Image: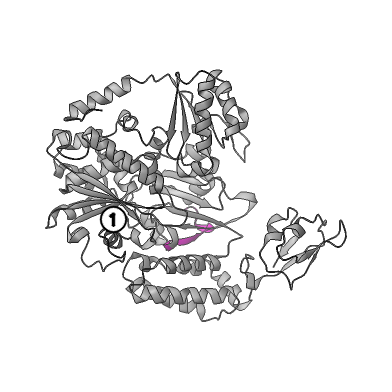
Amino acid sequence: MNRLSSPQELEALRESIVQSRDPGKRCVTICGGTGCVALLSGDVIATLREEMKKQGVESTVDLRVTGCRGFCERGPHVVIHPEGILYQRVKEKDVTEIVSETIVNGRTIDRLLYVDPVTKQKAVYESEVPFYSKQRRLLLDSNARIAPDSIEDYLALGGYAALSKALSAMSPEEVLEEVKKSDLRGRGGGGFPTGRKWQTTRDAEGEPKYVICNCDEGDPGAFMDRSLMEGNPHSAIEGMLIGAYAIGSNEGFIYVRNEYPLAVLHAETAIRQAEECGLLGDNILGSGFSCRIGINRGGGAFVCGESTALMASLEGKVGEPRAKYIHTSEKGLWEKPTNLNNVETWANVPLIINNGADWYRQIGTENSKGTKIFSLVGKVNNTGLVEVPMGMTLREIVMDIGGGVPKGKKLKAIQTGGPSGGCIPESMLDIPVDFDELDKVGSMMGSGGMIVMDETNCMVDIAKYFISFLEGESCGKCVPCREGLKRMREILTDITEGRGEEVDIERLERLSETLLDSALCGLGNTAPNPVLTSIRYFRDEYQAHIRDKRCPAGVCKALITYSISDDCPGCGLCVKTCPQGAITLVEKKKPVILDREKCIKCGACYDVCRLDSVIVK
């Protein structure tokens, strides 16, 4: 592909790509994101190529490996275009039938279609699947339509048109004003107005100025930025270039954790392709604007998701945060003005420039515009990535899109905002999800993690888990975080092991207030949220652990006992499963005998029993 030297050449190239593609031609897309790769989509892809060649359709059908489609619970996904037939949980053994029946003869394969677990209705097309029908996929939609290693696919969908428009028809000030007018807020956790941050960086004294893309999400269960960078890296790069133009920067970095090898690979490929096309580097599209972007691999430290710790790491120093009385927009990377946004924030910028701030402002709530991508995980039927307008309620997200809680269990709580987020009880399911409403109930948007918990989750144990995680990830630089989290974990451990005292709840609250007021960075400031919200909304569970030495959810080993029901049919499954030999089948079709002295309370017998014969108290 020749190097482009003007917006006109870019548009001509786009038109030639579109015209060379037959919209009526069969195309098979299959997810190649990390989630589906783990489900062996690579084997399905290889077999598809072989089978299409064997059945003589290789030259008449395109095979496109795309990024994450979001519905991770049902991967790998195969979609047959132009009909849009969606097959889910496809295995290598299904490939021959897909090619012969659907690709060659146009017949659907019922057993591969999505079946709604409640209505039992089959869905042939993606739009008929409840998981997708309530979403508004401004960003994730492209993940399902392009090959992430193909700049041609991105250009065919209008890629780099926003950059071309900004460079040829808008001044840096006009670009900046459009982003400010859109009310786009940062999707990395803080929700700070993006345009205001850009303005501060532009106005700050010092050269050069830098732009950074944060792809170092470390929240357990969160994979929004990873999936965007894996599936559509050009969208983030285009956003960075537009931001650099508005700010007055000529150099940027993508900071991506090394545990994201596919995101690293696709980002490297996208940068190389953009440079070869003249969309990155010197004199972009003949505009006189030059910008280069490099990639830095992080070591996986959770604290390096914090802006100042990230920049220290990028400089080759220990990833520790610094006090924020001096903002990174004024003195950031190498003490120069630096603008940092996460992948999702940068990817929104081309949409705003292409469609206008007024269009963007129509989506969302008064103070939270646009859509937000959440990773919906935990005790929910439909796990995966969901993209919804700001303001959609938790109930709609979890019950309608997520399909509710599996196995008929009762929903207990939802934690939003990652390990530093708050636990929101089931009684508050109807609150709208946006920056301000979540903050009001003690939680936060964060980067978009959303963990669903049911009646089998112990909220004290949940608080202990997150505090333990944050303690391990703390850099240890400031005393409140280093010592406060350790002490909170010790108190929570005492409570879950039957050593809790009445005063422990007050101690946890005092420690939480100390961290909120005096920790150095956001990790410490927000770390108490799981504890404070679990005490606020589930105080009765703390009191049961402390006063009654009982875990209502049957989770905390020291506070529970196992027994066998008189209705036990003596099937012997638990006998085979018990790792300690604590269960004995004395007589067939009679209840088994449990030796509590040998029982280590691992729960293996409870997990395998299909007749509720194992009782946990």
Q: Is residue 459 left or right of residue 487?
A: right
Between residue 363 and residue 341, name the one nearer to us.
341
Q: Is residue 319 left or right of residue 24?
A: left
Q: Is residue 506 left or right of residue 348?
A: right
Picture layout, residue 276 above or below residue 607? above
Magenta span: 420-430
Residue located 36% across and 75% down the image: 480
Q: Is residue 85 visible?
A: no
Tell me the quarter of the picture where residue 552 sits.
Answer: bottom right
- Residue 389 percent coordinates (x, y): 39, 44
Q: Is residue 601 visible?
A: yes
- Residue 336 percent coordinates (x, y): 17, 58
Q: Name the residue beneath numbered marker 1.
A: 192
Between residue 277 and residue 424, name the one nearer to us.
277
- Residue 597 percent coordinates (x, y): 74, 73
Secondary structure category for the residue under label 1: loop
